[in-house]
Amino acid sequence: MIQIKDLHKRYGKNEVLKGVDLSIPGGGIYAVLGPNGSGKTTLIKCLLGLVIPDRGSIMFREQSIKKQWEYREELNYLPQIANFPGNIRVRELMGMIKDLRQKQGDEGDLSALFGLGPFLDKKLANLSGGTKQKVNLVLTFMFDSPVIVLDEPTSGLDPASLISLKNLIKREREAGKTFLITTHIMQFVEEVADQVVYLLEGQIYYTGTLAGLLEKTGQSNLEHAIAAITSEKKDA
């Protein structure tokens, strides 16, 4: 579904992406991991068309995304920080996003799933960080799109909501959706991810299953595998 070839991006003297090649077939959950500054966010923003790469290509359904935006109709995106006016009410925000995307959204069941009923008529400025994240999750999942990009989706969630999110992701995967997820919570990755994409200093260090990464690093869990990669790089 997504083909990324020889992707480069530089900000001034800082070369963030150094020839990234990545193939993402339709269906499945891909965890995009790496230390801060590894290029994860830039890679995701290039895919979304929010950052223009200096060199390389991105193909979506065998069509280049360059100079065309229609493909983004098939993407849902949860940013790490979603900023909306504080004086807008939750229900109004959901209606506004549906108007902007010109699509009907299935926000009712999702609002119930995350317990947002009591907050629908409250202003965003009066919500806790965790409740705002639940609102953002509803905004992301309420449209039926084949590709869903989640940047730190667990931020601020209570245990019950985290379980609901994991179940929702697994259910959508079973419906054939493709997920790209960035997160620093390794337990979350171990529980939901089908494939791991590990970026290191702007290049892909590993792409494959979690079991394959553990074998490559000789570790027993993902947290120790990531620590081993970081230590190996520092010693190199």
Image (tube, rainbow, N blue to C red):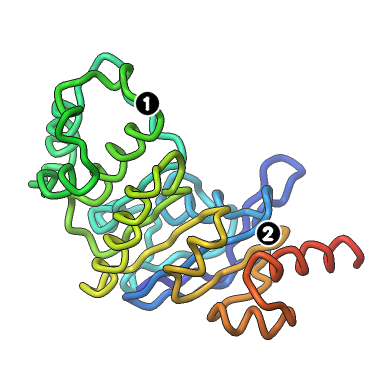
Which quarter of the rendering shows the N terminus? bottom left
Q: CA–CA distance between discs 1 and 2?
A: 35 Å
Image: 152 above or below 74: above
Figure quadrant of residue 6: bottom right
Q: Position of residue 17 (x, y in %)?
A: 65, 57
Given this view, does label 1 or label 2 mark the residue nearer the observer? 1
Q: Earlier in the sequence, mark 1 or mark 2?
A: 1
Circle 1 sits on which residue? 128
Q: Is residue 138 above or below residue 116?
A: below
Residue 192 location in percent, x, y? 42, 68
Rendered location of residue 105, percent (x, y): 12, 47
> What is the secondary structure assignment of the residue under circle 1?
loop
Mark 2: amino acid: Gly
Instruction: Give the label on residue 202, or none.
Output: 2
Picture residue at 73% right of the left edge, 58% below the top: 201
Q: Residues within 10 Å of mark 1 (few under 14, many from 20)?
A: few
Q: Closest to the observer: 13 or 189?
A: 189
Question: Residue reaching furthest top?
Answer: 87
